[in-house]
Image (cartoon, grey):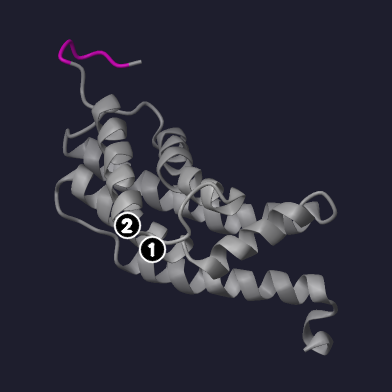
Amino acid sequence: MYARYGDKKLLFEAAILMEIEDRLSFLEQHVPEHGDVRLELEELSDELLSWMLTDIHVALERVVMAEAARFPALARNLYEFGVGRTTRLVAEVLRKAEERGEIRVSDANFAAEQFISSVILSPFRRAALGVGVTSHNETSSARMRQAVDLFVYGCRPSLKGSHP
């Protein structure tokens, strides 16, 4: 294996990137389209949290965070490949919802970043720090739905037709 990847760091990175690729490729091919942004974001979030809030993924996050200072390129690559790609996926859901008039956002990419930070990365970080659950269960699902509701409420079209 080292002949192909060169060293442990590259092998570790390749293993994580393959896992991310498998999951995100599936999600990209099965983007929820219900005509209701709340349901679409809940379904997408549920899929992501079910995948991410597992013992193995939480452990991998801890390793990546611990090694980020020593291997900044590794951390940057994993962030862009995972979070960046997920953000683009959510941004597309938001753009379609805006086209339907359900929400109003001035920058779908920025809104998607905020969504990912609050709905996905926050519980993942809590789990990695040992202060949150390491499985997607009824409690994390209820919190996820609350966060989605808050986000969608904040993005609703203004009654006066203006939006910051």
Quadrant (top left, top right, bottom left, bottom right) of the C terminus: top left
Against 8, residue 151 (above or below) is above
Q: Position of residue 19 (x, y in %)?
A: 54, 73
Amino acid type, mark 2:
Asp
Residue under the image location 45 percent in, 54 percent down: 133
Magenta-colored stretch includes residue 156: no
Marking on residue 65: none
**Marks 1 & 2, CB-CB < 8 Å contact:** yes
Asked whether, in this view, residue 75 is left or right of residue 115, the answer is right
Q: Position of residue 143 (x, y in %)?
A: 33, 43
Q: Position of residue 86 (x, y in %)?
A: 46, 53
Q: Which residue is mark 2?
A: 46
Against 4, residue 81 (above or below) is above
Q: Position of residue 94 (x, y in %)?
A: 31, 41
Query: How many neighbours does mark 2 have within 10 angstroms: few (below 14), some (14-19), or many (20 or more)?
Result: many
Q: Which region shows up in magenta?
A: 159-163
**Residue farthest to the top?**
160
Residue under the image location 25 percent in, 44 percent down: 96
**SS assignment at label 2:** helix
Between the residue at mark 1 and the residue at mark 2, the CA separation in whole angstroms equals 6 Å
Which quadrant would residue 11 be assigned to in this image?
bottom right
The prevailing secondary structure element of the residues shown in magenta is: loop
Marking on residue 50: 1
Residue under the image location 41 percent in, 31 percent down: 107
